[in-house]
Amino acid sequence: PIRTELGRRIRRGFVAPKGKVLLTSDYSQIELRLAALLSEDEKLTDIFVRGEDVHAAVAAQVFGIDQRDVTKEMRRKAKVINFGILYGMGVNALRENLGTDRAEAQEFYNKYFETFSTLAAYLEKTKETAARTGYTTTYFGRKRYFPGMKSPLPFIRASAERMAINAPMQGTQADIIKIAMARIHTLFEREYKGRAALVMQIHDELMFELDEDVLRDVQPKIRDIMEGVLTREETRGIPITVSA
């Protein structure tokens, strides 16, 4: 936990032994980047290819203004829906998260999907395919099954639909980080045995314990492996970026 003082104090309890350092490397907004990749939505893809702040750029598109005129509040709203759509968030959940009324939430929801219409079509198609076949697939072809899609209970079906919408993106991200972990392990065994170790994975982040004297050498190699699981050709120019 990092958002509260108590959480930050708990974090300070985790320290590297003498002569070693802890390094964390995490993927930046990877699920949104994968949403652009998997849906082939040109507007969302262009935002990442141009290296723009995705939340500010989406706010500019949805509100129909220049990016320079985007306020902090507009960016916050765009961030809520950017991540919300990845989890199948409906209008009511959006209203709650935005702290607004239903009419404004509905308008924002509609504008978002009018703007990113290819993404909207992809999410709808994902839901329909899961209802028909009972599963979704990641970029790498790994399947996840959703027996709840066939449930006679509406709330069970709705829950399965939300999970199915998210599964290809979150599942592809999980595949990517597992591939990176295997390659990094091979690197450590070959070049840094006893001097570098992977100690933890948290969603899209990896934590390492390294000898201080190998940090400068190994950190860029870790980044290159993590960023290079998919080639630029495979991501259609969407950069997969890692911060450390």
Image (cartoon, grey):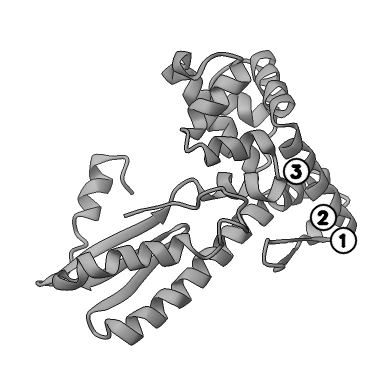
Instruction: Tell which of 244 and 5 is nearer to you.
Output: 244
Question: Which residue type does callout 1 highlight?
Answer: Thr
- Reading the image, the residue beneath label 1 is 133
Give how far across and how far down residue 148 sits, in percent.
79, 56
Asked whether disc 1 touches disc 2, contact meaning CB atoms under 8 Å apart, the reply is yes
* Quarter-of-image position of residue 175: bottom right
What amino acid is at disc 3? Answer: Leu
Residue 47, quarter of the rendered image: top right
| Left or right: 121, with 212 as reference point | right
In the rendered image, residue 59, in percent from the top left (x then y), is placed at 55, 23
Q: Position of residue 1 (x, y in %)?
A: 33, 49
Disc 1 element: helix
Front position among marks 2 and 3: 3
Q: Can residue 151 be seen in the rendering of this structure?
A: no
Label number found at residue 123: 3
| Point 88% across, 51% down: residue | 152
Residue positioned 77% across, 60% down in the render: 146
Between 94 and 180, the residue placed more toward the observer is 180
Mark 2 residue type: Ala
- The residue where tag 2 is placed is 130
Q: Residues within 10 Å of mark 1 (few under 14, many from 20)?
A: few
Alpha carbon separation for disc pair 1 and 3? 15 Å
